[in-house]
Amino acid sequence: MLLCSSCVAAGAQGVPTVAVSLPSASAGRTAPARPAPGSTPAWVSGQGARLTVIPSGAELALELFTRLDVLERGPGGARVICSVCIPVVEGYLPEADLVTDIYPPEVAAWGTLPEFLLSVREAAVNRDMTLLRPVMAGDFTYAFVGVQTPDEAFAFWSAENFWSLDEMADLLDPGVRTTNGRIWAAPSTFVSNPAYHGARAGFRRRADGRWEWVYLIRDVNDRH
């Protein structure tokens, strides 16, 4: 069974320093993003993306798969708001650093990590078990005890009225991070802060190049 101790280091060693302020463990995850009026959502498509902040012109490093709200597009790139950043910031980002197209998870699993994450996020929002099942690891982990399989996870989520699954969008939107290049975890605070005790999700790329979802675990003390 894949537990969180196998996917996060004791500290932030090996994790690139980023300029986005993240909440402390006592504050929990960032609050769910509220779309800006008239905006369309997009997510950061690669590592090393930098937002040119308005009006200072400073560059702000963003986590992979950070959610942004696109206000307009132009020759200078997309003007966006990062509602999951602390504090909330507005700026410009090249179009090439954004992902917006949503594919079926089985298709996206052969693409980039952001494409895969976006497909899983969409299916989770829609509680679409048929789409999620093929991209879940055979030993998919949903709890710290008990038999761990996708079918057991589905039964658990159904019994709790999909409370855990409904949190996937908010877990993913602040971005994902890795310490070892093997497991990518959300939220990024889970990786950077060993005192984090909230829900977390993890993903990995198989030897054949296909992405898979490996866990969605809630802390033992985290109750609805």
Image (spheres, helix red, strand yellow):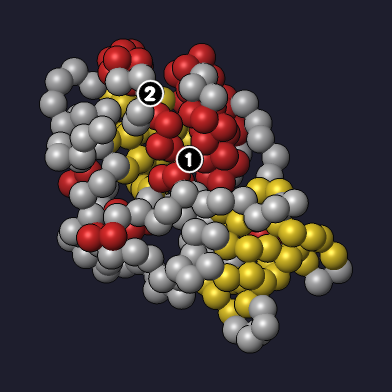
Question: In this rendering, is residue 5 above or below 220?
Answer: below
State the SS at label 2.
loop
Image quarter (top left, top right, bottom left or bottom right) of the N terminus: top left
Q: How many marks?
A: 2
What amino acid type should be assigned to the residue bearing mark 2? Phe
Q: Say which residue appears at 45% left-offset and 44% top-offset.
A: 170
Which residue position holds label 1?
A: 169
Quarter of the view holding residue 163: top left
Which residue position holds label 2?
A: 162
Question: In this rendering, is residue 215 above or below 7?
Answer: above
Quarter of the view holding residue 216: top left
Q: Which of 153/25 is in front? A: 25
State the SS at label 1.
helix
User: Which label's residue is closer to the chain start, 2 or 1?
Assistant: 2
Q: Say which residue appears at 29% left-offset and 15% top-offset.
A: 159
Question: Does residue 177 appear in this view?
Answer: no
Q: Say which residue appears at 33% left-offset and 58% top-offset.
A: 189
Q: Which of 223/196 is in front? A: 223
Q: Give the residue at the far right of this rendering.
A: 75
Residue 11: horizontal and vertical position, in percent? 22, 64
Q: Which of 205/35 is in front? A: 35
Q: Label 2 vs label 1: CA separation? A: 13 Å
Q: Which of 60/79 is in front? A: 79
Residue 85: horizontal and vertical position, in percent? 49, 65
